[in-house]
């Protein structure tokens, strides 16, 4: 089966391309390269021994998307193309709503024209807002504390309404917690352009000497050490969840939401300590004021995915930091 991976040269998208290929699917990639590099294609070929079809462009480009969907007989879309920084979203909300919501709606319209009725959506645990209880399950009320999270809430709502109006439509929303790690080969990992927005690449760049120190935003949260607690999940576990969800539901219709997390929360300082052990170096850090939109703690109840998808996270914290460090030392400046 041919499937389209939007944002397929990004961190999670590129790892999903590998997992889909290994599972027997034929992934085609579209990416606008706003936060990724065409050099990822070389790494994908190095890891898999296979070359992938790639299109540079925007998912909101109706003509381009129609060409891809029809020329490749696409039967499902794995949708990762989105802006993803919480802090940036509070500063540039219109860019986030336009890119994450408007372009997704445009893509769904193009899919409808081409008869493509399956989508796996890269959602987020930010759709739970400020947690009312922990661990978070799929029945938790939906909300958000920042524009990035609201874009995920809105797209999920769009998908639910679209499935209600089209009895053949399948939409799977996978609510990620905090993806980290890298491919165990050390040939592919998170390679953000500019200053990283996520914790792990910032720690890694500090450990390798690119950054002088790590900024820790807030040390007065109601957690065991005052720093924010998150559920970190290895990217290899995350992408296996995508394949499992698609395999289970490929002949179904309707809207289905799943948490993908470990159920274990680690603080920022916990992650610094674990990475220091992997890198065998001290990580310099500086305490800064809290960021708007951040919450104290956030971790998953992923029992629904275990029960229905027969999926659970297998990688521990050490493998997350070891694999990240292997990637960072192989490619200190990422892929350029």
Image (tube, rainbow, N blue to C red):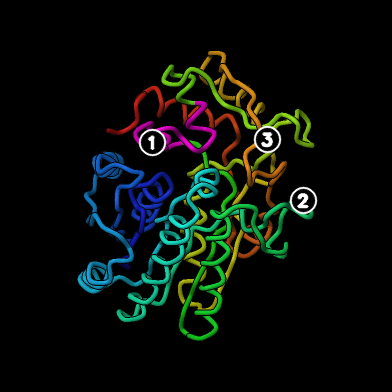
Identify whether 90 is placed above or below 30.
above
- Mark 2 is surrounded, within 10 Å at the Cα level, by few (under 14), some (14 to 19) or many (20 or more) other residues, namely few
Between marks 2 and 3, how big is the CA–CA gap? Answer: 14 Å
Disc with the residue nearer the chain's start (1 vs 3):
1
Q: Is residue 169 left or right of residue 63?
A: right
Q: Secondary structure at mark 3?
A: strand
Q: Which residue is mark 2?
A: 134
The mark closer to the camera, 1 or 3, is 1
Seen from the viewer's position, the closer of residues 211 and 73 is 211
Image coordinates of residue 281 in percent, x first then y, are 53, 13
- Mark 1 is surrounded, within 10 Å at the Cα level, by few (under 14), some (14 to 19) or many (20 or more) other residues, namely many
Asked if the residue at tag 1 contacts the one at tag 2, i.e. Cβ–Cβ closer than 8 Å, the answer is no
The residue shown at (49%, 38%) is 197
Q: Is residue 320 left or right of residue 19?
A: right
Seen from the viewer's position, the closer of residues 287 and 269 is 287
Disc with the residue nearer the chain's start (2 vs 1):
2
Quarter of image, res 318: top right
Q: What secondary structure do most residues of the magenta stretch adopt?
A: loop
Quarter of the picture holding the C terminus: top left
């Amino acid at each position: 089966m041919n499937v389209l991976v939007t944002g397929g040269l990004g961190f999670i998208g590129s790892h999903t391309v590998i997992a889909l290929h290994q599972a027997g699917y034929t992934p085609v990639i579209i990416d606008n390269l706003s936060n990724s590099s065409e050099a990822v294609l070389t790494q994908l070929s190095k890891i898999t021994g296979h070359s992938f079809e790639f299109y540079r462009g925007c998912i909101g480009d109706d003509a381009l998307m129609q060409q891809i969907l029809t020329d490749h007989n696409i039967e499902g879309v794995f949708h990762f193309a989105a802006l993803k920084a919480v802090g940036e979203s509070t500063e540039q909300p219109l860019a986030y709503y336009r890119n994450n919501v408007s372009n997704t709606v445009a893509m769904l319209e193009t899919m409808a024209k081409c008869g493509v009725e399956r989508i796996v959506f890269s959602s987020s645990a930010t759709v739970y807002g400020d947690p009312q209880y922990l661990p978070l399950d799929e029945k938790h009320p939906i909300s958000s504390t920042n524009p990035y999270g609201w874009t995920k809430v809105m797209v999920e709502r769009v998908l639910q309404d679209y499935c209600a109006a089209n009895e053949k439509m399948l939409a799977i929303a996978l609510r990620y917690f905090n993806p980290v790690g890298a491919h165990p080969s050390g040939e592919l990992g998170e390679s953000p352009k500019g200053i990283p927005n996520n914790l792990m690449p910032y720690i890694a760049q500090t450990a390798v000497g690119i950054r002088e120190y790590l900024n820790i935003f807030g040390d007065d949260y109601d957690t065991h050490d005052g720093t924010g607690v998150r559920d970190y999940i290895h990217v290899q576990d995350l992408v296996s969840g995508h394949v499992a969800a698609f395999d289970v539901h490929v002949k179904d219709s309707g809207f289905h939401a799943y948490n993908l997390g470990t159920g274990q929360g680690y603080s920022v300082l916990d992650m610094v300590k674990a990475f220091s052990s992997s890198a065998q170096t001290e990580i310099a850090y500086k305490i800064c004021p809290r960021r708007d939109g951040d919450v104290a703690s956030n971790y998953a109840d992923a029992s629904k995915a275990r029960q229905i998808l027969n999926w659970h996270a297998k990688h521990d914290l050490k493998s997350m930091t070891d694999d990240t460090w292997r990637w960072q030392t192989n490619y200190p400046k990422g892929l350029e």
